[in-house]
Image (tube, rainbow, N blue to C red):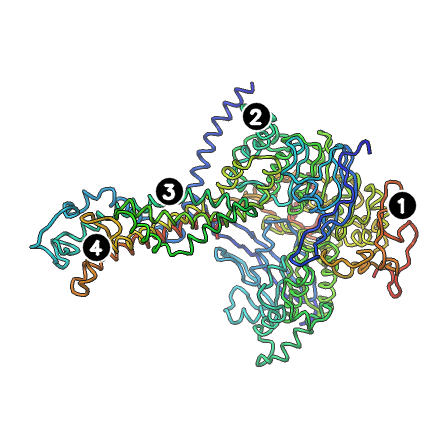
Amino acid sequence: MASSMLTVRNMKKYFPTGKEGKFVKAIDDISFDIRKNEVVGLVGESGSGKSTTAYTIMGMHAITEGTVTFQGQDISMPAVKRSGELKRQLQIVFQDPGTSLNPQRNVGQILRVPLQVHKMVPQNQQLKRAEELLALVGMEPETVYRYPKSLGGGERQLIAIARALASSPSLMVLDEPTSSLDVSIQAKIINTLMDLQKQMKMSYLFITHDMSLMRNIADRIAVMYLGRIMEMAPAKDFFEKPQHPYTKMLISSIPVTLEREEQLKPDSIQSRGEIPSPVDIPPGCRFQGRCPYAKALCQEEEPEMKERFPDHFIACHYANGEIMERKEGLSNGQ
Amino acid sequence: MEKNSTLLDIQNLYIHYRVYGGTTKVVDGVNFQVKTGQKIGLVGESGCGKTTMVRSILQVLPLQARIPEGRILFDGDSILQMKRKELNQVRGQKLSMIFQDPTASLNPVFTVGSQIEDTIRYSGLVEGNNKKVIREKAVQALKDCAMPDPERILTCYPFQLSGGMRQRVCIAMALATASKLMIADEPTTNLDVTIQDQVLRLIRELCDQKQMSLILITHSLGVARLMTDWIYVMYAGQIVEKAVTARIFEHPYHPYTKGLMASIPKLTGEGIMKGIPGKLPDYLNPPKGCRFQDRCEKAMDKCRQQKPSLFSVKEDHQVACFLYETKAGEQEVEVHG
Amino acid sequence: MTNRRSNVTAEAERQARKRARVENIKRSWYKFSRNKMSVVGLVIVILIVLVAIFQEAIAPYPQHARQYVDFINANKAPCGQFLLGTDAYGRDILSRIIFSFRNALTMALGVLLVSVPIGVIMGLIAGYYKNRIGSTLIMRIIDIFLSLPSLVLALAVAALLEPNLFNSMMALTFSWWAWYARLIYGKVSSIRNEYYIQSAELIGVGKIRILFQEILPNCFSTILTKMTLDMGVVILMGASLSFVGLGEQPPNPALGTMISDGYKTLPDNWWLTLFPALAIMLIVLAFNLLGDGISDMMSSGEG
């Protein structure tokens, strides 16, 4: 707890639908920590609530229930009510480089906005600082005069990162920053991000659906499904000894290129079924519809996150390191 | 048509776009073959020209496109010389395409059933456009795509279906009429990884069952590895390497292919990947010689003067790179640089 | 050391920016001129403006645009001496049409330069604070203004005041701002949730700065296109007002007045009505074509 930078406890975020009593339960009771100097990866598919988690932490959505604490301070309020200092410490980089930069402003103007708002440097040094920020992300100082539309997707993301860095944050939330980029450009961005993380001693909440990427950059990983965390563990354990059936299903589905990666995949669970809608979540474990191991208890009671191994939390009634029995009629690899 | 005869033969294809400032040479002398029953992967990053090339097969290029040179032969006939009627028949009955975004491929104001039936009707496959027969074909197509409750799905609108199901509808539409070649342009990029797995398996099974050839366009080498017999790697409008799938992963030759593989994060946790420095060349004024020269560590003088063409380095493995050229110009002997 | 580097790069940067600006203009022209009709529109608009500026020099009988009577030459059909014929007072139609341009353009610019800022500001506020009371109130007021036919409203206002050019401009301005407010409301509603605005909010940028420095620049293209198209529409409305006698008063020439004077004599003295009507049509058409071209120019993509 002492070294925890961000603490989320029992967070819920429900969105109203038109109908009475029916909500989109985007986040349905999650709890986790982000420690100092740590990269936490949050993975999940559509409807998992990972982006909503990021936005709620940033204050873009009002929290429905639960608490978020940042460096000991309660930050469960929406962004408009947050102090300037808090806004400075918590920054976000969005997924789509096309719309995260104002097309009518040049790079210099874009980078100066946080410098001005947080009074990071006096007016006459702001241009110089902008150039320094560009150098930090590996771009030429001349870029200050260019407009976003003359830059490629990877370069725009680097600007978005530089903008986030401008206020010297302690925690950066990165919402799929490289998902829309080619893999050769992604590599450069990820390298830059990880160098910066070590250099500036920040923590990252890194959201992605790319598990292979997570394997290489995250210290700990949490996987979400339909608004709940199914499993959270240090990266090595997560991939070498995954416990939750959903985690196994995800890892099995990754298309890999090398034989040695193929062998690393856990007892393969082939994906079946569709992801249900977050409006009508069935009672009991929300994964039971697709789980090859589901039993009677899974339909009645929703499993709690339990620490079954050191620092390794799992939300499943039966996952405790032993071999699980499959439902009748389902053999391995099906 | 016997197995292993050439179904699609693209010869020396050039495609240019007329834009502000001149013409962009988007596809630059591409040779590409698909045999019956083969599954070919076309791998490349955004902007490499793979979508453009494939659209030229179906002749659905935008207005500013020009084809100054090259031939496209499908099932023995030249696509570039076909008249509209003949082209429509080919497009209706032999060829089809699935696109990246299933939501954008389906008209939101019509039911899925009416869209599939329209496709069948316009293909001219059903004599006299008999409604009953068309209906049955539509239901059968959905069944082939492992859709539960096909009759009910036919009455649904696209927004009532999930992303994976929409893509399966698109596949059904393609399947209902095409018999020889399916072109899939990044069919699973927008889908979740577990659904992607299901859809890809489906496409592979269907192609095997129906003896249909497949061109799979993707930027993911991992996906290509699962699905294809041969892989063509494309960079900046040129094919830089082509080989039987297993061979490419065993031993990639072209510096771009190597760079691409090195950039992919590995499940084994080997550490953060290197990228490929630099950017795509300017298509308006492409450099003389190899288009990869500015980004290649091993670029030689020759690379800046001449454009390399594909030649064999091994059985079933060709590269377009001077690093592997010998004095004779054929068959790998020594490696330069 | 730092200073010298800044100077050197500053100069190089100035050059680079100039080059970029020229490049930008060339590219915009390319997009504009792809449609030949837009260029036609531009040429005609330029000609109209030149005519308005140099009306004294261009009109064959400038004095006919003022108090002038010559019954001998009254109601003459188009001939060598009077290219478009003369009216009931013997005044040359061509000269009067030429002199009406300046008033028409003045009226259009006057109406727009006042109504656009008001409308845009209202639209910005209403769009940004979409779910608050103030916004709803503004939008309902706009709804009221838009539901009344603008011409009828303008007539009512103009009838209350003394009929002249200035008052008819005010009458039109009275309801014109509402269109811009609604247009900008729509644009701001869609931009408001874009990530770059959210980023600015999350960083802590003040609301006024967000409205005017982040959101407004993205509306310029919409505003400019609509203003161009509106030039033609306002001129047409102005002509309608002067048709019923509520605009520019005689003897100052106005296109609408000329039509209203002449239409009673149709089809005999056809030139009294036809030529002013064609002039209006030409002006509106020119601005429409120009507006199309501007819209093409502002849009991204070269297809």
* Residue B94 screen position, x and y as percent: 61, 70
SS class, disc 4:
helix
Disc 1/disc 2 C-alpha distance (Å)? 52 Å
Question: What is the quadrant of residue B159 in the picture?
Answer: bottom right
Q: Chain of mark 2?
A: A
What amino acid is found at the position of numbered circle 3 in the picture? Answer: Val
**Nearer to me, B275 or B81:** B275
What is the quadrant of the N terminus of chain A in the image?
top right
In the drawing, what numbered circle is on residue A128? 2
What amino acid is found at the position of numbered circle 4 in the picture? Answer: Met
In the drawing, what numbered circle is on residue C114? 3
What amino acid is found at the position of numbered circle 2 in the picture? Answer: Lys
* Residue C237 screen position, x and y as percent: 32, 53
Label 4 or label 3, whichever comes before in sequence order: 3
What amino acid is found at the position of numbered circle 1 in the picture? Answer: Arg
Disc 1/disc 4 C-alpha distance (Å)? 92 Å
SS class, disc 3:
helix
In the drawing, what numbered circle is on residue A308? 1
For disc 4, the marked residue is: C258
Crowd tier of the residue under label 1, counting other residues whose Cα lies within 10 Å: few below 14, some 14–19, many 20 or above? some
**Nearer to me, C190 or A250:** C190
Residue furthest right as drawn: A322
Q: Nearer the viewer, mark 2 or mark 3?
A: 3
Disc 4/disc 2 C-alpha distance (Å)? 64 Å
Q: Chain of mark 1?
A: A
* Residue C251 screen position, x and y as percent: 18, 48
Give the left or right position of residue C150, taking residue C137 as reference: left
